Image (spheres, rainbow, N blue to C red):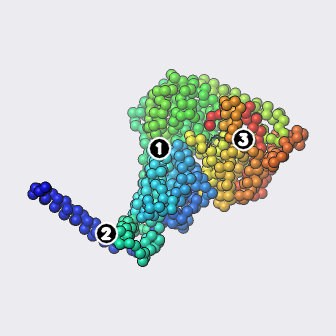
Amino acid sequence: MALSFNSKAIIGSLLALTAGKASYSLIQMKRDCKRINENQEKHGGKLVANTFKAHGITHVFTLTGGHISPILVECERSGIKVIDTRHEVTAVYAADAMARLTGNCGIALVTSGPGLTNTITAVENAHLAESPLLLISGSAPIVQHDRGALQDIDHAGLMKTVCKYSKKVLAVRDIVPEVKKAIQIALSGVPGPVFLEIPYDVLYSYEHVKQALVPSGTKVSFPMGNISLWKRDYQLYNIFHNAWTNKYNYDDFNDSYYAPLQPDVPKYCKCQFKKAENLIANAKKPVLILGSQVMLPPIHAKELRKAVLRLNMPTFMSGMARGLLSDKNSEQTNKNIQFRFVRKQALKEADLIILAGLPVDFRIGFGRGFNPKAKIIAVNRSVEALNMNTDIYWKPTLKIHSDCGSFLYDLSKSEKVNSMKFPIEFNTKLRQLELEEKNKLSKKVTEAENIESYGKVNPLVFLSKLNERIEQTRLREDKDVIVVVDGGDFIGTAAKFIWPTKPLHWLDPGLFGTLGVGGGFALAAKLVSIEQKKNTDVWLLYGDGTAGYSIAEVDTFVRHKCPINICIGNDSCWTQVCRQQKPLFDGSDVACPLEDRHYEVVGAGYGGKGLLIGSCKAEEGEEPDKKNEETNFTQYVIDQKISEFFELRRAYPGRPTIMNVMIDGGSIEKFRKTSKYI
Ligand SMILES: Cc1ncc(C[n+]2csc(CCOP(=O)(O)OP(=O)(O)O)c2C)c(N)n1
Ligand SMILES: [Mg+2]
C-alpha cells in the first residue's frame, strides 16, 4: 500500500523526534555520569540522620539489619540514641509511645523483608491510636528489584493500607525531601504512621554500591549481557546524579536544607465557634468527654488543664487524656469536675455533650447511651470520626473539624462561656453517684481481704495494696509514675485501682486492643523520663499470657539501663477470653488455659531481678498447696511481699524488676462478669 505524502511526513517527524529524544538522553546521561564522583564516600544514611537531628529526634528504635546500617551508624555519630530491641514490633511500639509522650514524630528503623513484615501489628496499632511515627525499612538494591534479590518484596505497596503515606525513595537526592515530607504528613491532620523504603543502593555510598553491584571485569554474553550491564550502570547514575550539590552542607544538620516542614493542623471556623458558645450558654447539664486527641500539640497539657478547669463542667477523660485533672495531692482540689466511674449515668442525663477528640466507637458504646435529647458538639481532627455511627445511635448538633486542644482552649477564654454558671445540682448528683461507686469498690476489697486464699493472691487485695504503695512512694520521693498496661482481665481490674496522676502517664494500646505493646511502650516511657531528667517510675503491668509477647525485652531494658518495674498478674490462663467463651460454648475452655510459669525466672534470665509472689506449680506432679496458715495469702503477707519487691528495686537500682504474682483467677470472675475487650 502506497503511503500518502502526509503519512510519510508524519512518520518521518516521529522518527526524527525519537532519534532526537534518544540522543538527548545519551547526552544527558553523559553529563550525569560526569557529575558523579566515583570515589564518593558520602552516603544517604548521613542525610537521614541529619534530617532527624534537625527535627529534634533524640531516639530511634531498631532491630538491626545490613540494609539500614548507614542510618544507624550516622544516627549514633550525630548523638541520636539508637535503641535496639529484641523484636521489630517492639521498636515500632516504642516509636509510637515516644510520639505520644513527646508530641514529636517517633522513629523506627528496620531491615528489609521480614524486618518490615514483623512490624505490621504495631504500625496498625499506631494508625488506630492516631500516633505519628516514621518507619523506614531498607530494601534490596533498585538495580536488583524483581530479580530474585534477598528479601525483595514490594515494601511500599505492602505498607500502603496501614500508613498515611508510603513511598519508595528512588534516588539519593530525594532522601531529605522525602523524610521531611513523611514526617510532616505523620504530624498533620489526624496524626499517624508513615513509611519510607530506602533501597540499598540509595542508602550506601556510590563507591560501595559500585563495588558491590557492578564488579569490574564481569564477563557477560553479547549483546544482551552488555545491554543489561549498561542499563544497570545507567540506573546507578540515575540514583546518584545530583546527590551531593553545593546547595546544602552535607555535614551540618543545622543547614536549612534539613529543616522541618510545618505540619497542617485543622482549625475550627469562627461561625462554628459562635454556635458552640450558644449551645453552652443554653446548657444546664453539660458533660465534657476528652479523648487522646486533646493531648496533641500545639496546646500544652498544662494549658489544656487550666482551660478545662475554666470550662468547669463535669469532665471524663479517656486514653492519653487520663490524669489531665489529677492533682499531686488530691483529686478534691480540682473544683470537683473530674469523674471516673459514672460516665454512663452522666451521658444519659446530660443536656449537652461535648466530645473532644473521641470517636463514637465501641469505647463509648457507639453512642447508644447518649441522652437522645442532648445537644452534642463533636470536635475532632478526623472528618471520618465526626461522622462515625451518626444517625444510628447519635446525631451531632455541631460537627467541628478542628484541633481539639486549640478549640477547648479558645472556648475557655470566651467571655460568654466563662460567665456561665451551670446549676450545681447535676454535678452534685454525679459526685454522689461517683462516691457510691468508689465505696462499692472499697467494699469489694474489704470482702476480698477476708476470703482465705491458699497459695494464690487475691487480685483485688493485691492491686489495692500495690496502688497504695505506688502512691506513697510517689509522694515521699516526689516522683512521677507512668503506668503501661498490657493484658486482659488483670489489666481491666488494675484500671479500677490505678489512676494516673498526670496526663500522658497512662499508656494502653488504644482502639486496636493489641496485646504485646508493653515492652515497647515501657521502654519509650523510661527513655523519655531519662532524657527529660525526670524522676519517673515506670510500671509495666502484664497479664501472664500477654507477658509472653515482650518479656524478652527485659534484655533491652537491661542493656539500655531502663529500670522498669514489671508486675505480671499470673492466673495461668488467657482469662478474659476464657470467661466469655466458657459459658457461651457449653463449658469449653479450648485454647485458653496456660500453666503456672516462673516468669520472674525468665526475667532474671534476661538480666532483670525477679520475685515470686504466691506459689507457682510449674514442675510436673507438684501438688496444690495445702490449706494452712503458711499458705494463706492474707493482706499482711501480700503487703510484706510488695515491700520485698520495693527492697529489691532499691538494692538493684539500675535493673528492671519483675514480680510474678500468682493470682486467684476465680476472684476476678466474681469481680467482673463481662469483658470489654475481646
Ligand atoms: C495480639 C492479640 N491477640 C489476641 C487478643 C485476644 N485477647 C484479648 S484479651 C486476651 C487474654 C489475655 O490474657 P492474659 O494476658 O493472661 O490476661 P488475663 O485476661 O488472663 O488477665 C486475648 C487472648 C488480642 N486482643 N490481641
Ligand atoms: Mg492470664
> Which sits in the foreground, 564 or 675?
675
| Mark 2 vs mark 1: in front | 2
Q: Height in image: 362 above or below 11?
A: above
Question: Quick one: quadrant of the C terminus?
Answer: top right
Q: Position of residue 483 (x, y in %)?
A: 66, 46
User: Amino acid under label 3?
Assistant: Pro
**Badge number at residue 593:** 3
Q: Earlier in the sequence, mark 2 or mark 1?
A: 2
Q: Position of residue 217 (x, y in %)?
A: 42, 77
User: Amino acid under label 1?
Assistant: Val
Residue 498 in view of the camera: no
User: Amino acid under label 2?
Assistant: Met
Q: Identify the residue under disc 1.
A: 190
Q: CA distance from mark 2 to mark 1?
A: 42 Å
Q: Earlier in the sequence, mark 3 or mark 1?
A: 1
Q: Residue 398 lies in what quarter of the image?
A: top left
> Which secondary structure, mark 3?
loop
Q: Quadrant of ligand 1?
A: top right
Residue 500 in view of the camera: yes
> Farthest residue toward the top?
373
Question: Quick one: quadrant of the N terminus?
Answer: bottom left
* Residue occupying image coordinates x 48% and y 56%: 153
In the displayed structure image, the side of residue 520 where residue 449 appears, left or right: right
Asked whether disc 3 touches disc 2, contact meaning CB atoms under 8 Å apart, the reply is no
> Which secondary structure, mark 1?
loop
In the displayed structure image, the side of residue 25 where residue 554 appears, left or right: right
Q: Earlier in the sequence, mark 3 or mark 2?
A: 2
> Which sits in the foreground, 224 or 675?
224
**Badge number at residue 29:** 2
